[in-house]
Image (cartoon, rainbow, N blue to C red):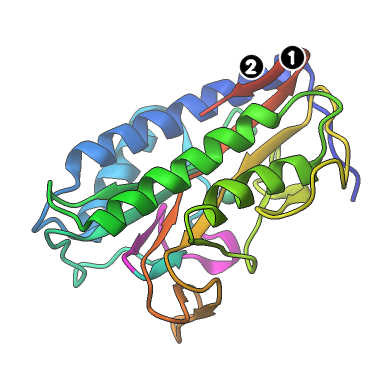
Amino acid sequence: MAIVIKSPQEIEKMRRSGGVVRQVLDAMRDLVKAGVTTLDLERAAEEKIRELGAVPAFKGYHGYPCVLCTSVNEQVVHGIPSAERVLAPGDIVSIDCGVVMDGYYGDSAITVPVGEKISPRAKRLLQVTQASLEKAIQTVRPGATLGDIGAAVQEVVESEGFSVVRDFVGHGIGTRMHEDPQVPNYGQRGVGTKLREGMVLAIEPMVNAGKPGVQVLSDGWTAVSEDGSLSAHFEHTVAVVADGAMVLT
Ligand code: CO
Protein backbone atom coordinates (compact mmCIF):
# COMPACT_ATOMS: atom_id res chain seq x y z
CA MET A 1 0.00 0.00 0.00
CA ALA A 2 1.07 3.56 -0.66
CA ILE A 3 2.61 5.76 2.01
CA VAL A 4 0.09 8.33 3.26
CA ILE A 5 1.37 11.91 3.41
CA LYS A 6 -0.11 14.01 6.24
CA SER A 7 -0.99 17.69 6.05
CA PRO A 8 0.22 20.09 8.75
CA GLN A 9 -3.32 19.99 10.20
CA GLU A 10 -3.18 16.21 10.41
CA ILE A 11 0.26 16.32 12.01
CA GLU A 12 -1.19 18.73 14.57
CA LYS A 13 -3.89 16.15 15.41
CA MET A 14 -1.22 13.46 15.69
CA ARG A 15 0.72 15.73 18.04
CA ARG A 16 -2.33 15.75 20.29
CA SER A 17 -2.68 11.95 20.38
CA GLY A 18 1.08 11.72 20.78
CA GLY A 19 0.83 14.08 23.74
CA VAL A 20 -1.64 11.72 25.41
CA VAL A 21 0.73 8.78 24.94
CA ARG A 22 3.57 10.89 26.37
CA GLN A 23 1.55 11.75 29.48
CA VAL A 24 0.56 8.11 30.00
CA LEU A 25 4.17 6.91 29.72
CA ASP A 26 5.40 9.67 32.06
CA ALA A 27 2.81 8.49 34.60
CA MET A 28 3.92 4.88 34.11
CA ARG A 29 7.54 5.80 34.71
CA ASP A 30 6.55 7.33 38.05
CA LEU A 31 4.50 4.27 39.03
CA VAL A 32 7.15 1.65 38.30
CA LYS A 33 8.66 0.28 41.48
CA ALA A 34 9.30 -3.06 43.15
CA GLY A 35 6.06 -4.74 44.25
CA VAL A 36 3.91 -3.14 41.54
CA THR A 37 2.37 -5.60 39.07
CA THR A 38 2.21 -5.06 35.35
CA LEU A 39 -1.60 -5.22 35.70
CA ASP A 40 -1.39 -2.24 38.11
CA LEU A 41 0.32 -0.33 35.29
CA GLU A 42 -2.34 -1.45 32.81
CA ARG A 43 -5.20 -0.25 35.04
CA ALA A 44 -3.60 3.12 35.69
CA ALA A 45 -2.82 3.57 31.99
CA GLU A 46 -6.36 2.80 30.86
CA GLU A 47 -7.80 5.27 33.36
CA LYS A 48 -5.35 7.96 32.27
CA ILE A 49 -6.00 7.41 28.56
CA ARG A 50 -9.75 7.77 29.02
CA GLU A 51 -9.39 10.74 31.37
CA LEU A 52 -7.39 12.49 28.63
CA GLY A 53 -10.18 11.84 26.14
CA ALA A 54 -8.44 9.23 24.01
CA VAL A 55 -9.13 5.59 23.17
CA PRO A 56 -6.58 2.80 23.70
CA ALA A 57 -5.21 1.60 20.38
CA PHE A 58 -3.87 -1.84 21.32
CA LYS A 59 -6.90 -3.32 23.13
CA GLY A 60 -8.73 -5.50 20.63
CA TYR A 61 -6.05 -5.05 17.96
CA HIS A 62 -5.84 -8.54 16.41
CA GLY A 63 -7.37 -9.72 19.69
CA TYR A 64 -4.71 -8.19 21.96
CA PRO A 65 -6.31 -7.98 25.43
CA CYS A 66 -4.77 -4.85 27.01
CA VAL A 67 -4.02 -1.13 26.54
CA LEU A 68 -0.30 -1.57 27.29
CA CYS A 69 2.39 -4.03 26.36
CA THR A 70 4.63 -4.63 29.39
CA SER A 71 7.74 -6.65 28.63
CA VAL A 72 10.04 -7.54 31.53
CA ASN A 73 13.75 -8.44 31.27
CA GLU A 74 14.21 -11.04 28.49
CA GLN A 75 10.77 -10.19 27.10
CA VAL A 76 11.30 -8.11 23.96
CA VAL A 77 7.84 -6.78 23.11
CA HIS A 78 4.11 -7.55 23.42
CA GLY A 79 4.22 -8.82 27.01
CA ILE A 80 0.66 -9.00 28.37
CA PRO A 81 0.06 -7.19 31.68
CA SER A 82 -0.70 -9.62 34.50
CA ALA A 83 -1.52 -9.61 38.22
CA GLU A 84 1.04 -12.42 38.55
CA ARG A 85 3.94 -10.37 37.26
CA VAL A 86 5.27 -8.50 40.26
CA LEU A 87 8.12 -6.14 39.39
CA ALA A 88 11.28 -6.90 41.35
CA PRO A 89 14.30 -4.72 42.14
CA GLY A 90 16.79 -4.88 39.27
CA ASP A 91 14.18 -5.70 36.61
CA ILE A 92 13.80 -3.63 33.49
CA VAL A 93 10.31 -3.18 32.04
CA SER A 94 9.43 -2.00 28.56
CA ILE A 95 6.11 -0.18 28.44
CA ASP A 96 4.51 0.35 25.03
CA CYS A 97 1.35 2.44 24.63
CA GLY A 98 -0.78 3.51 21.69
CA VAL A 99 -3.91 5.66 21.55
CA VAL A 100 -6.25 7.08 18.97
CA MET A 101 -7.88 10.48 19.31
CA ASP A 102 -9.89 12.41 16.73
CA GLY A 103 -9.09 9.61 14.26
CA TYR A 104 -5.30 9.78 14.56
CA TYR A 105 -2.90 7.41 16.29
CA GLY A 106 0.10 7.92 18.55
CA ASP A 107 2.49 5.13 19.57
CA SER A 108 5.49 5.23 21.92
CA ALA A 109 7.50 3.02 24.24
CA ILE A 110 10.04 3.39 27.03
CA THR A 111 12.09 0.92 29.06
CA VAL A 112 12.31 1.70 32.75
CA PRO A 113 14.54 0.33 35.51
CA VAL A 114 12.84 -1.06 38.61
CA GLY A 115 14.55 0.47 41.62
CA GLU A 116 17.88 2.25 41.65
CA LYS A 117 20.09 -0.80 41.42
CA ILE A 118 20.01 -2.49 38.05
CA SER A 119 23.11 -4.25 36.71
CA PRO A 120 25.64 -2.10 34.83
CA ARG A 121 24.88 -4.13 31.71
CA ALA A 122 21.14 -3.48 32.01
CA LYS A 123 21.82 0.21 32.53
CA ARG A 124 24.04 0.32 29.45
CA LEU A 125 21.39 -1.53 27.42
CA LEU A 126 18.78 1.12 28.29
CA GLN A 127 21.17 3.99 27.50
CA VAL A 128 22.26 2.50 24.20
CA THR A 129 18.76 1.62 23.02
CA GLN A 130 17.51 5.12 23.78
CA ALA A 131 20.60 6.65 22.15
CA SER A 132 19.99 4.54 19.03
CA LEU A 133 16.47 5.96 18.76
CA GLU A 134 17.78 9.51 19.20
CA LYS A 135 20.45 8.95 16.57
CA ALA A 136 17.83 7.58 14.18
CA ILE A 137 15.57 10.59 14.76
CA GLN A 138 18.51 12.90 14.00
CA THR A 139 18.77 11.37 10.52
CA VAL A 140 15.11 12.15 9.71
CA ARG A 141 14.58 14.90 7.11
CA PRO A 142 13.16 15.10 3.60
CA GLY A 143 15.51 13.25 1.24
CA ALA A 144 16.99 10.94 3.87
CA THR A 145 16.13 7.24 3.46
CA LEU A 146 14.74 4.42 5.56
CA GLY A 147 18.20 2.86 5.28
CA ASP A 148 19.65 5.92 7.03
CA ILE A 149 17.32 5.32 9.98
CA GLY A 150 18.15 1.61 10.19
CA ALA A 151 21.87 2.18 9.79
CA ALA A 152 21.87 4.80 12.56
CA VAL A 153 20.21 2.39 15.01
CA GLN A 154 22.42 -0.49 13.99
CA GLU A 155 25.68 1.46 14.33
CA VAL A 156 24.92 2.68 17.85
CA VAL A 157 23.72 -0.74 19.01
CA GLU A 158 26.37 -2.93 17.43
CA SER A 159 29.28 -0.70 18.43
CA GLU A 160 28.33 -1.64 22.01
CA GLY A 161 28.20 -5.36 21.25
CA PHE A 162 24.42 -5.50 21.57
CA SER A 163 22.12 -6.72 18.79
CA VAL A 164 19.22 -5.30 16.83
CA VAL A 165 16.06 -7.43 16.78
CA ARG A 166 15.05 -8.04 13.16
CA ASP A 167 11.78 -9.91 13.54
CA PHE A 168 9.86 -6.75 14.43
CA VAL A 169 10.09 -3.35 12.78
CA GLY A 170 8.73 0.17 13.08
CA HIS A 171 5.98 1.44 10.83
CA GLY A 172 4.13 4.30 9.25
CA ILE A 173 1.28 5.60 11.41
CA GLY A 174 -1.69 7.93 10.88
CA THR A 175 -5.38 7.09 10.71
CA ARG A 176 -4.27 3.48 11.23
CA MET A 177 -1.74 2.28 13.79
CA HIS A 178 0.25 0.41 11.19
CA GLU A 179 0.70 2.01 7.80
CA ASP A 180 3.39 1.67 5.18
CA PRO A 181 6.33 1.83 5.14
CA GLN A 182 7.93 -0.73 7.42
CA VAL A 183 10.80 0.90 9.32
CA PRO A 184 13.55 -1.66 10.03
CA ASN A 185 16.13 -0.99 12.72
CA TYR A 186 18.91 -2.13 10.41
CA GLY A 187 19.95 -1.11 6.93
CA GLN A 188 22.42 0.73 4.79
CA ARG A 189 22.87 4.45 4.54
CA GLY A 190 21.42 5.94 1.35
CA VAL A 191 19.37 2.83 0.56
CA GLY A 192 15.60 2.38 0.62
CA THR A 193 12.54 4.59 0.38
CA LYS A 194 13.23 8.33 0.50
CA LEU A 195 11.57 10.27 3.30
CA ARG A 196 9.21 13.04 2.24
CA GLU A 197 7.71 15.93 4.16
CA GLY A 198 4.43 14.78 5.75
CA MET A 199 5.42 11.16 6.33
CA VAL A 200 4.86 10.03 9.92
CA LEU A 201 6.84 7.08 11.24
CA ALA A 202 6.90 5.07 14.45
CA ILE A 203 10.60 4.37 14.95
CA GLU A 204 11.10 1.64 17.53
CA PRO A 205 14.43 -0.04 18.12
CA MET A 206 14.26 -3.34 20.03
CA VAL A 207 17.69 -4.32 21.28
CA ASN A 208 18.91 -7.55 22.86
CA ALA A 209 21.95 -7.63 25.12
CA GLY A 210 22.81 -11.01 23.57
CA LYS A 211 21.90 -12.52 20.23
CA PRO A 212 19.19 -10.98 18.02
CA GLY A 213 16.89 -14.03 17.83
CA VAL A 214 13.42 -13.90 19.37
CA GLN A 215 10.62 -16.39 19.89
CA VAL A 216 6.94 -15.93 20.70
CA LEU A 217 5.61 -17.69 23.81
CA SER A 218 2.54 -19.96 23.86
CA ASP A 219 0.28 -17.02 24.82
CA GLY A 220 0.62 -16.04 21.17
CA TRP A 221 1.96 -12.56 21.99
CA THR A 222 4.94 -12.33 24.31
CA ALA A 223 8.17 -12.18 22.31
CA VAL A 224 11.30 -13.14 24.28
CA SER A 225 14.96 -13.21 23.36
CA GLU A 226 15.85 -16.72 22.27
CA ASP A 227 19.01 -16.76 24.38
CA GLY A 228 17.26 -15.33 27.47
CA SER A 229 19.29 -12.12 27.33
CA LEU A 230 17.87 -8.78 28.50
CA SER A 231 16.00 -6.72 25.93
CA ALA A 232 15.01 -3.05 25.71
CA HIS A 233 12.59 -1.07 23.52
CA PHE A 234 12.18 2.66 22.93
CA GLU A 235 9.72 4.15 20.42
CA HIS A 236 8.63 7.57 19.20
CA THR A 237 6.11 8.70 16.63
CA VAL A 238 7.99 11.13 14.39
CA ALA A 239 6.82 13.41 11.56
CA VAL A 240 9.09 14.32 8.64
CA VAL A 241 8.95 18.13 8.39
CA ALA A 242 10.72 20.64 6.15
CA ASP A 243 13.69 21.16 8.46
CA GLY A 244 14.00 17.65 9.87
CA ALA A 245 12.04 15.62 12.41
CA MET A 246 9.16 16.58 14.68
CA VAL A 247 8.76 14.14 17.57
CA LEU A 248 5.02 13.82 18.23
CA THR A 249 5.26 11.70 21.36
CO1 CO B 1 4.74 0.79 17.16
Mark 1 surroundings within 10 Å by alpha-carbon count, few (fewer than 14), some (14 through 19), many (20 or more):
few
- Using the image, determine if residue 161 lies above or below residue 41: below
Instruction: Using residue 243 as the reference point, say whether residue 249 is left or right of it.
Output: left
Q: Magenta region: which residues?
A: 60-73
Dot 2, how many residues are within 10 Å of its Cα: few (below 14), some (14-19), or many (20+)? some
Q: Position of residue 142 (x, y in %)?
A: 82, 24
In this rendering, the answer to whether 162 lies above or below 54 is: below
Residue for point 68% across, 26% down = 239
Residue 61 x %, y %: 57, 59
Give left or right: position of 115 versus 25.
left
Residue highlighted by disc 2: 12
Magenta stretch contains residue 69? yes
Q: Which residue in the protein does label 1 denote?
A: 8
| Image quadrant where residue 243 sits | top right
Q: Visible in this render: residue 33? A: yes
**Magenta-drawn stretch contains 143:** no
Dot label at residue 78: none
Question: Circles 1 and 2: CB distance less than 8 Å?
Answer: yes
Residue 140 picture location, percent across and down = 71, 29
Query: What is the tally of numbered marks visible in this picture?
Result: 2
Q: Secondary structure at mark 1?
A: helix
Judging depth in this view, the residue of 64 and 137 nearest the camera is 137
In the image, residue 146 lies at what x, y percent?
Answer: 78, 43
Whole-angstrom CA distance, mark 1 to mark 2, is: 6 Å
Residue drawn at 38 percent across, 36 percent down: 49
> In the structure shown, which secondary structural element does the residue marked by tag 2 occupy?
helix
